[in-house]
Amino acid sequence: MKDEALSPVGERMETLPIAQPSDDIRAKTEQIIAKLIEMKHTNQQTGQLLLDWLRTEFDVQEPGKQLENAITLGLQAFVNEGRKKRPRTAKKLTPAALKALQEDYSEQIGPLQQSKTEALMLERKGNDLVNKEIMNDLAKREIFAYCNPMELILLLAQSLKID
């Protein structure tokens, strides 16, 4: 008797064994994950240092969502948001302070944006490795010839242990 489970639409479907990655794919995937974790940690530290700098140099005590996600801001939006979040009682920014704000944006946010792009590329590479392994495993069993696209998506989610 075949193992059966309910699909999200309530139909019965056969459960299939989860594809096991090859040693090569596992090693490559583990390297990608380790690099992504390292990048995330570094980016969080850099973001916190930027907020600390804004707090100490520009008296930005409540940075708000925009400055907390400064990586999504362009230079002018970053400067405007920094000005906006300063206390109303604070003196107007001097040209030197404004220049420092702009320079820090270039020094800190640029590398963060590059890191984000690199992380997206690594995630895509890891995703491609996993998908290739799963599809190879399914092809070996000639399973996907009998599955509709929704079943393939469910099989993929099941193999990645996604609920």
Image (cartoon, helix red, strand yellow):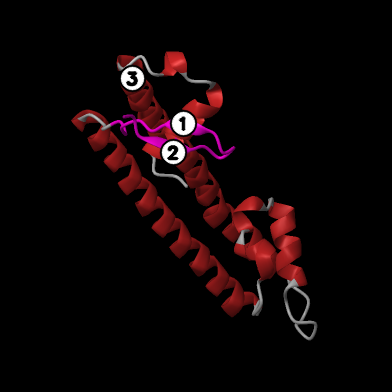
Left/right of residue 8 with respect to residue 13 in the rendered view: right
Residue hosting label 1: 13
Q: Is residue 115 magenta?
A: no
Q: Residue at x 51, y 51 (%)?
A: 112
Dots 1, 2 in contact, CB < 8 A: yes
Residue hosting label 3: 136
Q: Residue at x 75, y 81 (%)?
A: 87
Left/right of residue 82 with respect to residue 124 in the rendered view: right
Separation of residues labelled 1 and 2 (CA atoms):
6 Å
Instruction: Tell me the number on the disc at residue 5.
Output: 2
Q: Position of residue 102 (x, y in %)?
A: 65, 58
Between 45 and 91, the one lying in front of the other is 45
For the N terminus, the quadrant is: top left
- Dominant secondary structure (helix, strand or loop) of the stretch shown in magenta: loop
Location of residue 145 (image quadrant): top left
Q: Position of residue 20 (x, y in %)?
A: 26, 32
Residue 96 shows in this picture? no
